[in-house]
Image: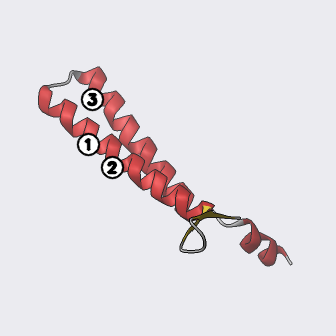
Amino acid sequence: MRVEWIGDEAMINWTELGEWATAFMVVICGALTGHYAAEGMNAIQWAGAISAVLGSVTLAVGVRVWPARQKTQRARD
């Protein structure tokens, strides 16, 4: 499935959108963690920040590694 913008010039598929969205989430989580770390955080806030960054990285890796539906069906055949 492809999404079309302004004719055929700018097209993006759902896989590319997911990859870019998760990369953006990693950058935002890291930036927010760095910002609040510079202001000073206690141990509970550090634990939450670390889990947020690790969760976003895990999601980004999962989106890129997860096999596509067509690839798994071809492998089964």
Tell me the CA gap for discs 2 and 1: 6 Å
Q: How far apart are the alpha carbons under marks 3 and 2?
A: 17 Å
- Disc 3: which residue: 46
For residue 8, the mark is: none
Tell me the kind of residue under disc 3: Trp
Per the image, the residue denoted by label 1 is: 31
Camera-nearest label, 3 or 1:
1
- Discs 2, 1 touching: Cβ within 8 Å: yes
Q: What is the x, y in percent for residue 32?
A: 27, 37
Q: Quadrant of the C terminus?
A: bottom right
Name the residue type under label 2: Val
Query: Which three-letter amino acid code belongs to the residue tagged 1?
Result: Ala
Q: Residues within 10 Å of mark 3 (few under 14, many from 20)?
A: some
Location of mark 2 (residue):
27
Residue nearest the viewer, comparing 21 with 41: 21
Q: Residue at x 54, y 74 (%)?
A: 9
Label 1, secondary structure: give it. Answer: helix
> Which residue of the protein is positioned furthest toward the right in this rendering?
77
10 Å neighbourhood of mark 2: few (<14), some, or many (≥20)?
some
Of the two numbered discs 3 and 2 in the rendering, the one whose residue sits closer to the viewer: 2
Whichever of labels 3 and 2 marks the residue nearer the N terminus, that label is 2
Compared with 34, 74 (above or below) is: below
